Image (tube, helix red, strand yellow):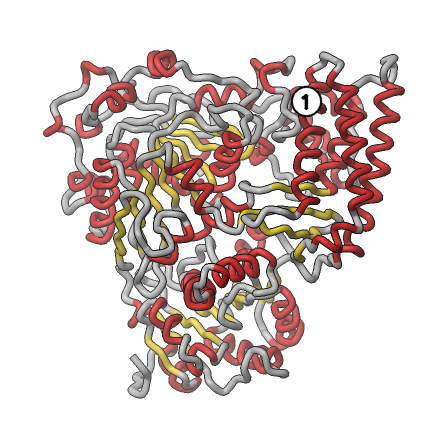
């Protein structure tokens, strides 16, 4: 927590002189420019802090170099620190950490990343758990002299990089650099909206109202405006009226623009050598550039990108390269439109009548949509079929007409709030027009319910073309890394999905691959239990039999188990059957926020029933987790509209979708689930796969080939003996 508190401020005092080993080699013009003092470099770039561009996300924290580099300070290249001198045997990392143990796997990966930067090429790097991959890519990135974006899937990894790994490199290893940690802009207090909220503070619940005095005191003293400084629940609905989004930010036309937390922190981040972001921020920026809202995008210009947790990139990218209209989006527009003009204004009557008409038509559309489209929250996503959408065409047209009328009114006015409403109306009309036609063969049209919200969406079936056009054409160095990129030891599947290989497996750009094994001894540390006595997952009675097996396995390990499911329905059924028979704390995903569940799990022997969000990005080292139970092979549901569309597209090309898409995707997902168990050299435990198909079906070999070399058995008695450390001789290697 010391590091986190230290780097929370926007700009820090110098922390002392750097060591000689920190000086980087000048690498041409880019390296020379990165070596300039911050003010000079910003002026040379002509960097912009136009809030009209930064509609989505912004930096949160920045820490500077210990001493700004200058061109005269750059020594000859032999003195430049190398990857080997920092991460190799007897290197700076070993000297900095008392308990450090040299990892050849880490150095192998770092050399591969360094080569990618030197050659300005692309790298797919699979790095097993325990490799130390974050330092393996951070070191060559910082030595490159280029501005690098590091993008992760989870906030946990973002914070590890910024508050743990980067301070280590800077303070203990002598590297000198500037770095920025960027979050979504809705994490920050908007001073303009806060001023309006104070005049009429309204809260959805009494509990939210009780938090107002504390929130108001914080707003008057915070230096960052970062919501994470407050202990607000995730469901604190009033925050939506206190923060900004791409729809509500006035940018440089805002009356408090110069004092805005967005403006101040973004300007500071423009001086950074390394930007730490998440995938959603990165692709929001990429999509924003493509939609013509400012060629600079949200992020400052960058030279290279490193995607960590890159196995989740396809889904993250797809969520931004499409079109979406929701009931929430229209509700927010109505609310903001009514608040954009004082009731005493002579024009308020006209504005109010236009907004009321829009609200009436919008409510009519989204109240009918679930019934017409066959939507329920339990069923998840459904395809938008043209014949069903046709039944909503009248309501959609009414909403479009009402939006156009509101837009025409606000266009004639000059206030920034009304100008912003004009843009929002136009974007909604464009998205509704795209959605109602259902014409693009490259998109899948679908709908879903989340709580009381209804969402209509059009997503690209593949993101490969979008990535080729928006990213690969402008950035010459990209590193993709994860513990799970290769299926059965091959990168072809992932590379094709990312648009790096074509359908014939031919690279479309210079791509290298490296698979770095985990340093863990999986044969000694882990057992893979494959029971064959359970019914097939599709057979009646499977969940009941699975619940029995869950209870028995938890008895072996004393709880301390993750029970991972491929569907919420099976999770809830198994939980209901087993919870009263487990003499441990029993936790269920959805009952509490994710972080609270993990904290409770670590505090005492527990059994956590969970689904999708706990299959990856969760780290519970030590004795707290000794058992991971997986209910069935994680094939994506063919009923999911996006999965179904991808299958149809592959079939239309004459390709085989099961072996070319469904099987490798499921194998990678299973490896993610397996990866929850062994997080350190001291960990030891069991992974139990309750789906007998991994043994009885021919494709089961593909799953087994993708897993770490754990010790295997089908026999419950042998498994228990192994866990207790007793000698056993009849297990399968």
**Mark 1 packing: few (<14 Cα in 10 Å), some, or many (20+)?**
many
What percent of the width, then of the height, locates residue 642? 57, 56
For residue 287, above or below residue 494? above
Above or below residue 334? Residue 671 is below
Examine the rendering and report whether any part of residue 605 can be seen. no
Q: Is residue 729 above or below residue 437?
A: below
Q: Secondary structure at mark 1?
A: helix
Tell me residue 540's x, y (percent): 63, 83
Quadrant holding the N terminus: top left
Q: Position of residue 560 (x, y in %)?
A: 49, 67
Q: Which residue corresponds to the image point at 49% horizontal and 18% vertical from the top-left?
A: 49
Foreground residue among 483 and 178: 483
Determine the image quadrant of residue 241.
top right
- Name the residue carrying label 1: 420
Where's the C terminus, which quadrant?
A: bottom left
Report how many numbered discs are placed on residues in the image.
Answer: 1
Q: Quadrant of residue 226?
A: top right
Residue at x-position 43% and y-position 45%:
157
Q: Residue at x 71, y 29 (%)?
A: 425
- Report if residue 680 is visible in the image: yes
Q: Position of residue 568 (x, y in %)?
A: 62, 64
In the figure, residue 205 lies in which quadrant? Answer: top right
- Of 348 and 82, the residue lying toward us: 348
- Identity of the residue drawn at 75% across and 49% down: 452
């Amino acid at each position: 927590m010391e590091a986190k508190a230290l780097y929370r401020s926007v700009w820090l005092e110098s922390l002392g002189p750097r060591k000689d080993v920190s000086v980087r080699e000048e690498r041409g013009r880019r390296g020379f420019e990165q070596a300039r003092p911050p003010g000079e470099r910003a002026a040379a770039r002509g960097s912009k802090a136009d809030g009209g561009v930064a509609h989505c996300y912004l930096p949160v924290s920045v820490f500077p170099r210990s001493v700004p580099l200058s061109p005269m300070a750059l020594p000859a290249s032999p003195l430049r620190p190398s990857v080997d001198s920092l991460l190799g045997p007897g290197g700076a990392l070993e000297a900095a950490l008392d308990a450090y143990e040299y990892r050849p796997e880490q150095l192998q990966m770092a050399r591969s990343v360094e080569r990618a930067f030197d050659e300005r090429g692309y790298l797919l790097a699979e790095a097993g758990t325990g490799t130390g991959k974050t330092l393996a890519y951070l070191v060559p990135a910082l030595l490159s002299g280029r501005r690098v974006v590091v993008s992760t899937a989870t906030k946990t990894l973002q914070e590890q990089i910024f508050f743990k790994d980067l301070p280590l490199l800077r303070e203990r290893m002598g590297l000198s650099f500037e770095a920025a940690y960027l979050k979504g802009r809705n994490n920050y207090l908007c001073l303009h909206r806060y001023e309006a909220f104070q005049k009429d503070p309204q809260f959805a619940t009494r509990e939210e109202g009780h938090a107002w005095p504390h929130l108001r005191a914080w707003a008057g003293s915070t230096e960052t405006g970062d919501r994470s400084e407050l202990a607000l629940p995730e469901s604190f609905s009033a925050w939506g009226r206190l923060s900004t989004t791409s729809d509500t930010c006035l940018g440089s036309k805002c009356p408090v623009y110069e004092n805005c937390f967005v403006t101040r922190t973004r300007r500071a981040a423009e001086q950074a050598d390394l930007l730490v972001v998440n995938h959603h921020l990165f692709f929001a920026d990429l999509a924003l550039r493509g939609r013509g809202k400012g060629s600079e995008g949200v992020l400052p210009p960058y030279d290279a990108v490193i995607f960590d947790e890159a196995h989740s990139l396809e889904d993250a990218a797809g969520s931004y390269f499409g079109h979406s209209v929701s009931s929430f989006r229209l509700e927010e527009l109505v609310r903001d439109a009514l608040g954009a003009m004082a009731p005493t204004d002579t024009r308020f009557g006209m504005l109010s009548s236009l907004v009321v008409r829009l609200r009436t038509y919008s409510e009519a559309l989204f109240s009918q949509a679930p019934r017409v489209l066959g939507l329920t929250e339990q069923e998840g996503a459904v395809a938008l079929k043209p014949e069903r959408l046709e039944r909503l065409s009248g309501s959609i047209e009414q909403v479009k007409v009402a939006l156009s009328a509101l837009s025409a009114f606000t266009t004639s006015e000059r206030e920034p709030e009304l100008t912003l409403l004009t843009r929002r109306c136009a974007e909604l009309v464009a998205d509704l027009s795209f959605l109602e036609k259902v014409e693009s063969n490259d998109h899948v049209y679908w709908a879903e319910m989340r709580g009381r919200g209804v969402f209509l969406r059009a997503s690209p079936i593949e993101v490969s073309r979008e990535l080729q056009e928006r990213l690969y054409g402008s950035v010459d160095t990209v590193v993709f890394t994860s513990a799970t990129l290769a299926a059965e030891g091959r990168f072809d599947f992932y590379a094709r999905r990312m648009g790096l290989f074509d359908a014939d497996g031919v690279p479309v750009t210079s791509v290298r691959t490296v698979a770095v094994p985990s340093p863990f001894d999986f044969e000694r540390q882990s057992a893979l239990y494959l029971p064959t006595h359970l019914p097939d997952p599709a057979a009646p009675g499977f969940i009941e039999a699975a619940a029995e097996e869950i209870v028995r396995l938890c008895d072996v390990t004393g709880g301390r188990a993750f029970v991972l499911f491929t569907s919420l329905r099976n999770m809830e059924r198994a939980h209901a059957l087993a919870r009263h028979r487990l003499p441990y704390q029993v936790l269920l995903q959805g009952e509490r926020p994710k972080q609270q569940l993990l904290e409770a799990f670590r505090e005492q022997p527990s059994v956590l029933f969970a689904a999708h969000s706990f299959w990856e990005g969760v780290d519970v080292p030590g004795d707290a987790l000794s058992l991971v139970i997986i209910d069935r092979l994680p094939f994506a549901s063919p009923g999911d509209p996006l999965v179904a569309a991808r299958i149809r597209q592959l079939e239309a090309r004459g390709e085989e979708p099961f072996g070319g898409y469904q099987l490798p995707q499921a194998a990678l997902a299973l490896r993610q689930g397996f990866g929850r168990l062994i997080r350190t050299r001291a960990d030891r435990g069991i992974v139990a796969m309750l789906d007998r198909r991994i043994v009885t079906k021919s494709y089961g070999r593909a799953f087994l080939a993708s897993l770490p070399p754990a010790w295997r058995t089908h026999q419950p008695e042998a498994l228990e003996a192994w866990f207790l450390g007793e000698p056993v001789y009849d297990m399968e290697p």
